[in-house]
Image (spheres, rainbow, N blue to C red):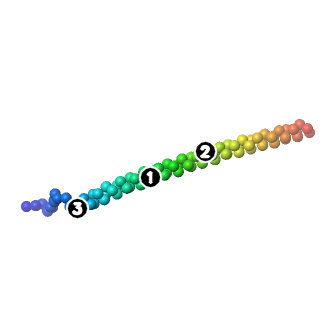
């Protein structure tokens, strides 16, 4: 008497092909994932470099603006003193 399920302990070709396909698919997925992470890391470094250049340029421009303001202030002071 059986309990309604029949278990077959033999290994079929379809099972082997499916298992190999899953393993190959898993490795392909992991490889693609690693490649994607490497690309994202490179893009992040590029964005960080670009941001550093923007910050440096902004700091330089701020310094130039402050120099212009100081010169204007000196000119205004000299105009006020002359009067």
Label 3 near label 1: C-beta < 8 Å? no
| Sequence-first disc among 2 and 1 | 1
Label 3 crowding class (10 Å Cα cut-off): few <14, some 14-19, many 20+? few
Label 1 near label 2: C-beta < 8 Å? no
| Sequence-first disc among 1 and 3 | 3
Determine whether, in the image, residue 66 is placed left or right of residue 8.
Answer: right
- Which residue is at a point 15% across and 61% down the rendered structure image? 5
Q: Spot the residue most to the left.
A: 1
Q: Quadrant of residue 79?
A: top right
Q: Secondary structure at mark 2?
A: helix
Q: Position of residue 56 (x, y in %)?
A: 65, 43
Tag nearer the camera, 2 or 3? 3
Determine whether, in the image, residue 78 is placed left or right of residue 5.
Answer: right
Q: Spot the residue most to the right.
A: 83
Q: Which residue is mark 1?
A: 35
Q: Quadrant of residue 10?
A: bottom left
| Sequence-first disc among 2 and 3 | 3
Q: Spot the residue most to the top.
A: 81
Q: Secondary structure at mark 1?
A: helix
Query: How far apart are labels 2 and 1 at the CA level?
Result: 26 Å
- Which residue is at a point 80% across and 40% down the rendered structure image? 71
Q: Which residue is mark 3?
A: 13
Q: Which residue is mark 2?
A: 52
Q: Secondary structure at mark 3?
A: helix
Label 3 near label 2: C-beta < 8 Å? no
Determine whether, in the image, residue 40 is placed left or right of residue 71.
Answer: left
Query: How far apart are labels 2 and 3 at the CA level?
Result: 58 Å
Label ID, residue 21: none
Q: Position of residue 24 (x, y in %)?
A: 33, 56
Q: Quadrant of residue 13?
A: bottom left
Quarter of the image that includes the N terminus? bottom left
- Which residue is at a point 37% across and 56% down the rendered structure image? 28
């Amino acid at each position: 008497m059986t309990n309604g399920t029949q278990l077959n302990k033999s290994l079929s070709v379809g099972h082997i092909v499916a298992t190999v396909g899953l393993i190959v698919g898993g490795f392909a997925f992991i490889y693609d994932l690693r490649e994607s992470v490497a690309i994202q890391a490179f893009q992040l470094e590029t964005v960080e470099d670009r941001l550093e250049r923007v910050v440096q340029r902004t700091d330089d421009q701020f310094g130039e603006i402050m120099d212009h303001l100081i010169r204007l202030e000196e000119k205004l002071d000299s105009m006020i003193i002359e009067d």
